[in-house]
Amino acid sequence: MSPQERLKLMLEKLGPTFVKFGQILADRPDIVSDKLRFELKKLQSNAKPFDHDIAVTLIETELSAPIAHIFKSFNFECIGSASMGQVYRAVLKNGDHVVVKVQRPHIKEKINLDLQILEYLAQKISEEYPEMIVMNLEGIIKEFGETLKNELNYFNEASNIRRFEDMFRDVSYCKIPKVYEDLSTSRLLVMEYIEGIPPDNIEELYAHGLNPKKIAENGVNVFLKMIFEHGFFHADPHSGNIFILPENRIGLIDFGMVGAMKPSQMEFLAKFVRAMVSKDATLLTEAILLLNINNKFRDKEDLEFSLDEMLKKYKSVPYEKLRMSQLLDECFRIIRKYGITIPGSIFLLIKCIATIEKVGTNLDPDISISNHIRPYAKALVKKQFEIPRIAKSILKAVKKYIDLGKSLPDEISDILYNIKSGKLTHDIKLDSEELFTKTIKQAGKTVALSILVSFLIIATAFIRAKGNSSFIIDAIFFISVFYAFILIIRLFSKLRI
């Protein structure tokens, strides 16, 4: 038995927390080897249902009422069991069919203990093997712990469901279950029951008159809308969490694990797709470095060379034939060599896209995920260059520089005071401290004035472009432009040799 297989068996014996941690590591090519990832992908939680009498007691405690007072009927045999809870079917007094998800007893205490053990192990490994510090095991376990604790609070899942419901309110081919908030608590979740056919049961889909090709198209569009339009996506879209409803609609369940992307990560997505379309290693390098958490990276040329070599393998492959999840995976295998730290949400994204490709191609072998991605990426690029968005960014930057201009003279005075009093050591040799002080103060005033003039030009130009001009606005605009012209002439006259 290989070391990788032994580690997998050990995690399974240690329990659900360690299994979940192994499953997360299986989606992190930047941390573990391909051999270990292959074994970790086989991990199964195999959670046995806990006693139904205990479950009923917990449900009634959370509802503060007997089950018979809330439900018209209640099936006391659970329909699903997981590491954190189990699920029952029921019918409310008004006739609504629902599922009731109840948390396992004492699971919070058990997970907290398991997390403490994982944190201790990570600390010891980092101390014993300093070369593994680059993997940031402690940071990974901290992130994993936060994810688990979020899943433990069912209010978070309810909030996720409401958010997805808002996102797909006007999308006819997607069904998000309704949450019954008045019956839900942090340890109990009551939501609409969705009955459908799993997408991997092709024969049953045909038997019900459904179209697998249309289902694949709808499913891909649902997840691409999440990723490219909203930057918020279902991070566990396997066949067990997807149901096919009449008219080829997509129904989703289990919203405990989600991914959320920052603006820089959305920009990465747009650049990544553009780089793949044009097979441009420079653009791909820029995209990847947008994700770099540490910001200190000096091997850009080497990284670009490695990515260019990777892209050459796909030079003759048409864009529509490219597998995005495979390309993302290859990219992150390359950047692992350079010690670049990537946010965990990006690996959830890779997992999501890989699962979409797998489910989609199972339904329709001819579907091109890359072709479906292209219009979403174009729309995302256009969105990034909308005039209001650019104006907002400019005004934000100008505000920062105005604040800098205001504080600069005081900060320079503090620095000079520290130099004079010997509190600040420096290697600058000054022939004339008085001249240096005068020059710095003058520079500070010039910077502050330049920023103010720039702000006035941008603000008045924006107002004039909107058609809301007046004599005062025009006067401020032209005076500011004239003064900017004077400042530029003065600058060039000082720089002339």
Image (tube, grey):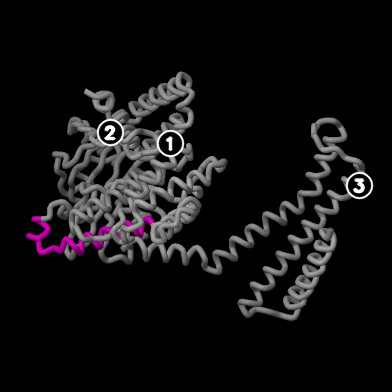
Point 35% across, 29% down: residue: 111
Q: Secondary structure at mark 2?
A: helix
Tag 3: residue type? Leu
Q: Secondary structure at mark 1?
A: helix
Nearer to the camera, 31 or 475:
31
Q: Secondary structure at mark 3?
A: helix
Q: What label does residue 480 carry, if any?
A: none
| Nearer-N-terminus badge (3/2) | 2
The question of residue 431 being in magenta is answered with no
| Nearer-N-terminus badge (1/3) | 1
How many residues crowd around disc 2 within 10 Å: few (fewer than 14), some, or many (20 or more)?
A: many
In the rendered image, which residue does mark 3 sit on?
435
x, y percent for residue 71: 20, 47
Q: What quarter of the picture does the C terminus occupy?
A: bottom right
Whether residue 390 sits left or right of residue 271 in the image: it is: right
Q: Main secondary structure of the magenta part?
A: helix
For the record, the magenta segment spans: 203-227
Tag 1: residue type? Glu
The question of residue 221 being in magenta is answered with yes
Q: What label does residue 40 carry, if any?
A: 2
How many residues crowd around disc 1 within 10 Å: few (fewer than 14), some, or many (20 or more)?
A: few
Point 63% across, 58% down: residue: 396
Badge 3 vs badge 2, beta-carbon distance below 8 Å = no
Badge 1 vs badge 2, beta-carbon distance below 8 Å = no
User: From where the camera sits, is residue 230 visible?
Assistant: no
Tag 2: residue type? Leu
Q: What quarter of the picture does the N terminus occupy?
A: top left
